Structure formats: C-alpha cells, structure tokens
Image (tube, helix red, strand yellow):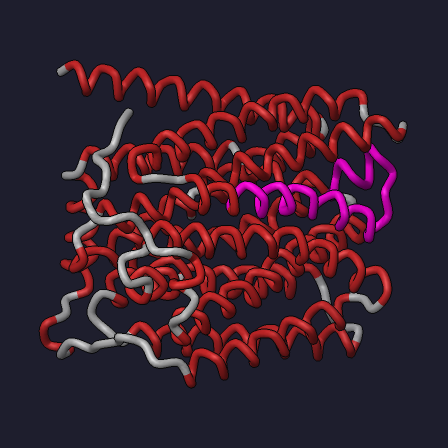
Amino acid sequence: MSIATDSRSPDPSIRATLSDPSFLSFWIVGGLTGVVRWFQLLALGVYTFETTNSPLLVSTVPLLWMLPLALFGPLIGAIADKMNRKMLFIGSLVMISLVSGSMAVLAWAGDLEFQHIAVASFLSGIFWAADMPVRRRLLGDLSGGAVSTAMSLDAATGNATRMLGPLLGGLTLQFVGLFGVFFFSAVVYAVSLVMVAVAKVPGRASPLGSFTLISELRAGVRYVRGDRVLRRILAITIAFNVFGFPFTSMIPVLGRDHLGLDAFMVGVLSSLEGMGAFVGALLVAWMARPANYFQIYLWGTISYISLIFYLSILSFVAGGPYHSLVVVSIVLMMTGIAGACFAAMQSTLTYLGASPEYRSRVLGVLTLCIGTGPIGFFNIGWMANIWGAPTALFVSSLEGLFVLLLLWLYAADENSA
C-alpha cells in the first residue's frame, strides 16, 4: 500500500501554528472535551461493572458512544460542507452541556439507573460525531497549510486526555461518585461553549435552496469510492475500530477481576495507554514527513492489534502478582504509542486526500467508518461475557490481524492489475 506524497512545502513549526488565536481556541476546546470523554467512559465503565457485574453491559457504554458516529457522521459532514461550522459546533456543545447537567441532577437525587447512562452515552456520541467533520475540519482550515502539524498536535492533545481523563474519572468516582463526574463534565462543556462562541472562524453558509441532503451524502460516498487511496485509508480505519480500539472497554474488567485493583488504580491502568499515546503523538508530530505518512498509519495499526494479542496472553496469567501489573502496564503504554501513529495520520491522510470542497463530507464518511466500532464493542463484550476478557481479547486480535492480511492481499492484487 502506498500514498502519494504532499507536494507542498513542509509544515511550519508548532509554535507558528499556535500563534493563531482561533486555532488555539479550537485546539484547547478539543483538549477540554477530550478529558471529559475519557473521564466519563472510565467512570461509567467502572460504575456499570460494579453495579451489574456484566462485561457485556460494560462494553455497551462505549458502544453507545460510538453508534452515533455511524448514524450521524456522514449527515453532519454533508451539512458542515454547506452551513456555518461554528454554529453547528455551538449547537452540539449546548446539547451536551444540558445532557451532563441533567445527569448530575439525577445522580444528586439518587435516581440514576443504567438506562439513564445508556441514553446519556448515546447523546454524547452525537456530540462526538460532530468533532471530526466540524471541529477538526476547522483546525485544518485554520492551520495555514500546516495540516500534519495541526492534526498531530491535536492527536497528541487528545491522547494526553486519554491519560488525564481516566485518572480523574477513577478518582472522582471513588471519592465523589457519579454526581461529581457529571457536574465536572457540565462545567467543562459550558466553558468550551464560551470559548467557541467568542472565536473567529472562516465559517460560511450556502442558501438552503442549493442544498439537497441525500445528494450531498451520496456525493461524499461516491467521492470516496472513486479514490483508491481513500478507500485503503478508510478500510484500515474500519479494521482498527472493529478489532483494535474496543479492547479499551475490557481494561476495567481486567483491572477489577484479574488484577484486583480499586476504581482509582483502574483509572491509573487505563491512563497508561493514554500516556503512551501522548508520547507517540508527539513523536509523530516531530518525525512525520509526507513521504512516510501512510507507512506510519499502516504499521501503527498492525502494531496496535499485535500488542492486544500479546496483552491477551498476559491476561491469562495476570492474577494479582506485582510483576503481572508491571508488564501489563508496559504493554498498555506501547499500545498507546502504536495507536497514536494511527490516530494522527488518520485525520491527516483523509484531510489531504480530499479536495477542499469535499473535505467535510469525506471526514463525515471517516466518522462513519469510525462508527463501525460498536460492532467490535459488542463482539468483544459478548465473548467476554461467555468466555472471559482474556479469551475475548485473544479472538478479537486474531480476527483483526486476519482482516489486515486480507486487505494487504487485496491491495497487492489491485496494484498488480
């Protein structure tokens, strides 16, 4: 597999990119909301497992977060190519602020049940479905040509939130409870809303008469289908999100059942994958060049799924000994580094691979591909419910490596044709 390199001049420095106040605002908002995302996912996963003792229901929480990406990602992408992206993002922030505030009230009153968590997770997923075609599209537009720098910096920040979020989530859940989780979330979303409202962005709106939603959706899908490079990028995205990323839903199960950790230590364990991802994204921002973008993306995916396979082997023998916790921690950090290579290059390659007039729609299709993740979350949760988390990780990772092999054989055949 290969991809054409970008013929433009090298990306400016990170310092130059951050000199734009508007870019800075949307970058910071991405970091703040990213903390809340992983903060809630860890806290809700641990809380669900403690109250239901069901790995399947634990995996249902991230599944519901990701389902709207498939349902609404292309829709939002089509709308974002025709309407004011800033206003779309403001609307999503208003919605998610109200959701978190309502959940905080339910938790304070002691009326919070799993069905409320399920609804809040789905609505949170709608907010995240807008992130790729709206906020990240704006970051690319505001980068002044420094797309790789902007996307890698955003990925590094997002991965740092995967380190900080679980730590805060485990700590807050253990000492304050779910009220604290949702109250903190509502405050962060409200602050983000103010920052976006005062930022100046290159938004535009087309007359409604020129906009036919179905035709715009079809145009985005046709554009991707007609581009061999984009097809390969998005096929790898699907493999990663179905057979790779869902392993994160099993970290609370491994921590509680196989390592005997409390909520805070489960948060620490989860944050190690985010720590590795943060370090990896910084390395990508420093070392990536147009000539090796696709290689970083591909080998990051292969390494990520291979490390999950190794983690599954460790999980069979991890039963509380200190050395097991140490080794699992190291593997999670290495997995995070590999995942950072995938995440940074996924946005960069998709953005650069699409012409400007199609970028939001193509990013919407990318969101749809990311939204295949619920298949993987259900798959791994169902297997864990029957055979246990270690076996679920083992089978899922083997499935992922097999799919990547098929994609490689298909690409080789396509190149030789």
Give the residue at x 69% y 48%. Answer: 271
Q: Main secondary structure of the magenta part?
A: helix
- x and y percentages locating residue 222 in the rendered image: 16, 45
The answer to whether residue 279 is above or below residue 198 is above
| Quadrant in which the C terminus appears | top left
- x and y percentages locating residue 183 in the rendered image: 69, 75
The answer to whether residue 408 is above or below residue 157 is above
Instruction: Count every numbered label the image shows and give the total.
Output: 0
> In the displayed image of the protein, which residue is found farthest to the right?
321
- x and y percentages locating residue 124 in the rendered image: 53, 64
Q: Is residue 267 left or right of residue 236?
A: right
> In the displayed image of the protein, which residue is found farthest to the left?
210
Q: Give the residues in magenta.
A: 252-281
Q: Is residue 383 left or right of residue 207?
A: right
The answer to whether residue 27 is above or below residue 65 is below
Give the residue at x 52% y 51%. Answer: 156
Q: Is residue 195 left or right of residue 292?
A: right
The answer to whether residue 285 is above or below residue 410 is below
User: Magenta stretch containing residue 255, yes or no?
Assistant: yes
* The one of 119 and 265 positioned closer to us in this rendering: 265
Give the residue at x 38% y 57%. Answer: 132
